[in-house]
């Protein structure tokens, strides 16, 4: 039953909206820093992985990208425990500081020509640090935003987690587009790729100031609960919820990264479009994708979160192969833009409410841990490896296998979405 908006006083409503803005702005900076790597990879890959084969260079940079995801489960566990035992606010502040340091490190790294094999090693270490940070960011931010969202409009307000997550991607690719206008190819490969990492590190410090003003949503009693942040309690009492979240997040993460970070490389490396054209296409598609999130969040408030998830899994399984096959041989930038936007609309059924759906599966004392760890594990295995798997299969002449791999995982997401309760077990009683 929808709770009327008048349930809140004007002052409380304003405070909650400000909290959503504050938390999501920090989320934007975190994801900008993380995605800058993906969008700049085509320029800095030769500096760290010398090779005559562009695909091999991209495979290596994608491998480092995937390695960052492997740290996410550790980040999800550490920061989830911090959030449940010491507060959501503290966890979010620590994670954005860590991201700042990782970005600054990449911006200052010497290349392979300067220090040999130590260059890719240090690049890997910086990405592992960023992966640890982002592993903790998602679960804590999803938990915080779900807890402060207005009842009856939780789908709408919680969707702003992905508005800012996609906004981070959009700003990253937009900055690359701007740099492409002022710097030529050689300048971008020589030093231009470092500029976005410097911008990201500076923005992270601004985010830290915003997050300091946030109000804590967890109570002292909750934080002192003996089960707070306990991984033993999570698997003892909430194993089924954890497995369900793991199941649909696997497909959600895979298709999300397929049509966002990997798609720019796909348009260049497979469809044969120019790098600038691919950047323009992805900038426009990501902008529309960002704008879709509140709309799909409102839709979920009307039709129910479970139904949105079922539409996501079903349409994803049916449409992935036709869309990717068409894009493979496409020559029209406009048609490519339309197809990618269509794919992202399907993904929006999931991304607009993903954090909220996960948060509703766990009680407050293990919520950040449950959301963060389940998401991070699925993301590390399926999301982080998307580019690496796709490029590796392409190098072996089996690129079409990747399309069916995504399709199968979407079918899995549909099946796990059937396990979702028609009414959320938790969160609707909180706050």
Image: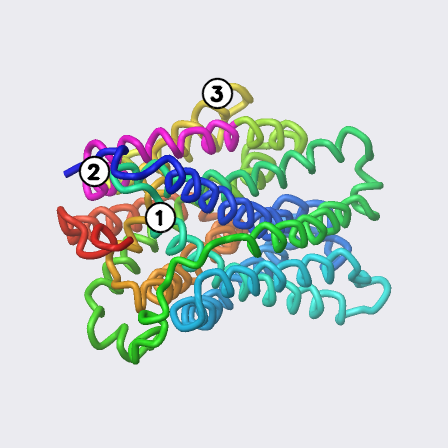
Q: Please tell me which residue is depicted at 76% across the width and 56% down the height of the picture.
A: 107
The mark that comes first in sequence, 2 or 1, is 2
Identity of the residue drawn at 42% across and 71% down: 77
Instruction: Tell me the SS state at disc 3.
Output: helix
User: In terms of secondary structure, what is the magenta stretch mainly?
Assistant: helix
C-beta proximity under 8 Å, tags 3 and 1: no
Between 240 and 429, the one lying in front of the other is 429
Magenta stretch bounds = 285-312
Find residue 3 and name its label.
2
Q: Is residue 183 left or right of residue 175?
A: right
- Verify CB contact (< 8 Å) between mark 2 and mark 3: no
User: Which quarter of the rendering shows the N terminus?
Assistant: top left
Q: Position of residue 104 (x, y in %)?
A: 73, 58
Camera-side mark, 2 or 3: 2
Marks 2 and 3, the one that precedes in the sequence: 2
Local crowd size for mark 3, using a 10 Å CA cut-off: few (<14), some (14–19), many (≥20): some
CA separation in Å, label 3 and label 1: 24 Å
Residue at 77% from the left image edge and 55% from the top image edge: 47
Q: Is residue 405 visible?
A: no
Closest to the camera, between mark 2 and mark 1, is 2
**Residue 200 is a magenta residue:** no
Q: Which residue is mark 3?
A: 335
Q: Position of residue 164 (x, y in %)?
A: 50, 41
Q: Which mark is residue 252?
A: 1
Label 2 close to label 1 by CB (< 8 Å)? no
Q: Secondary structure at mark 2?
A: loop
Q: Is residue 281 left or right of residue 402?
A: right
Q: CA distance from mark 2 to mark 1?
A: 29 Å
Image coordinates of residue 219 in percent, x first then y, are: 35, 65
């Amino acid at each position: 039953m929808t709770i009327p908006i008048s349930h809140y006083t004007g002052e409380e409503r304003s405070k909650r909206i400000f909290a959503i803005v504050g938390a999501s702005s920090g989320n934007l900076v975190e994801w900008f820093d993380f995605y800058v790597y993906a969008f700049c990879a085509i320029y800095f890959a030769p500096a760290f992985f010398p090779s005559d084969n562009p695909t091999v260079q991209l495979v290596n940079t994608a491998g480092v990208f995937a390695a960052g995801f492997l740290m996410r489960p550790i980040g999800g566990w550490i920061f989830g425990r911090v959030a449940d035992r010491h507060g959501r606010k503290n966890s979010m502040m620590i994670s954005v500081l860590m991201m700042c340091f990782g970005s600054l490190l990449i911006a200052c790294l010497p290349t392979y020509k300067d220090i040999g094999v130590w260059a890719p090693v240090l690049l890997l270490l910086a990405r592992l640090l960023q992966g640890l940070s982002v592993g903790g960011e998602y679960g804590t931010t999803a938990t915080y935003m779900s807890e402060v969202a207005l009842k009856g409009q939780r789908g709408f307000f919680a969707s702003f987690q992905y508005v800012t997550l996609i906004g981070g991607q959009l700003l990253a690719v937009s900055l690359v587009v701007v740099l492409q206008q002022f710097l030529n190819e050689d300048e971008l490969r020589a030093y231009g790729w470092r500029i976005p990492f410097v911008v990201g590190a500076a923005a992270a410090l601004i985010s830290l100031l915003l997050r300091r003003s946030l109000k804590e949503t967890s109570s002292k009693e909750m934080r002192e609960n003996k089960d707070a942040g306990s991984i033993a309690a999570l698997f003892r009492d909430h194993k089924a919820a954890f497995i369900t979240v793991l199941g649909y997040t696997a497909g959600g993460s895979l298709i999300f990264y397929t049509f966002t970070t990997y798609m720019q490389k796909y348009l260049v490396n497979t469809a044969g479009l120019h790098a600038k054209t691919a950047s323009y296409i992805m900038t426009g598609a990501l902008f529309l994708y960002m704008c879709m999130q509140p709309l799909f969040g409102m839709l979920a408030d009307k039709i129910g979160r479970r139904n949105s998830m079922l539409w996501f899994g079903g349409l994803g399984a049916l449409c992935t192969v036709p869309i990717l096959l068409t894009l493979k041989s496409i020559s029209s930038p406009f048609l490519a833009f339309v197809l990618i936007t269509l794919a992202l609309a399907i993904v929006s059924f999931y991304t607009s409410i993903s954090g909220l759906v996960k948060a509703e599966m766990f009680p407050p004392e293990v919520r950040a841990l449950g959301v963060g760890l389940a998401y991070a594990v699925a993301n590390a295995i399926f999301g982080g490896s998307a580019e690496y798997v796709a490029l590796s299969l392409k190098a072996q002449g089996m690129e079409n296998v990747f399309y069916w791999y995504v399709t199968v995982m979407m079918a899995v997401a549909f099946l796990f979405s059937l396990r979702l309760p028609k009414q959320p077990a938790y969160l609707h009683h909180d706050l």
